[in-house]
Image: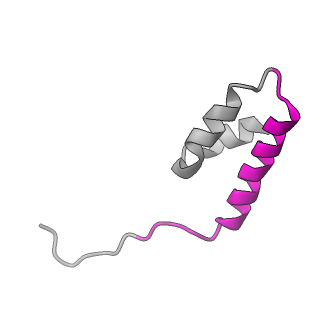
Amino acid sequence: MIESLLYLIASRLDIIFSVCMYARFQSSPKESHLTAVKRIFRYLVGTHSLGLWYPKEAHQT
């Protein structure tokens, strides 16, 4: 599970701290760590339609 989240942090900087925090416990995870990783996945499902919009400006300075 954590490997797919590590792949996503290249484009989703809002989850980088949480993913790296739980990646430290990858070798011996506890139930609380797995619950937190599932919470990150729920957050991602809820924010999949959000993104950045860069307007095209006519005048560049």
Residue at the limit of the structure toward the top, as seen here: 27
Image-quadrant location for residue 1 = top right
Check the picture and name the quadrant holding the C terminus. bottom left
Position of 11 relative to 55 (above/below): above
The percent position of residue 5, horizontal first and vertical second, equals: 69, 42
Which secondary structure is most common in the magenta stretch?
Answer: helix
Residue at the limit of the structure toward the left, as seen here: 61
Image-quadrant location for residue 46 = bottom right
Q: Residue at x 88, y 36 (%)?
A: 31
Q: Residue at x 70, y 58 (%)?
A: 43
The percent position of residue 39, horizontal first and vertical second, equals: 76, 52
Q: Residue at x 62, y 33 (%)?
A: 20
Query: What are the residue bounds of the magenta stretch?
Result: 28-53
Q: Residue at x 57, y 42 (%)?
A: 16
The percent position of residue 12, horizontal first and vertical second, equals: 56, 51
Q: Is residue 33 left or right of residue 46?
A: right
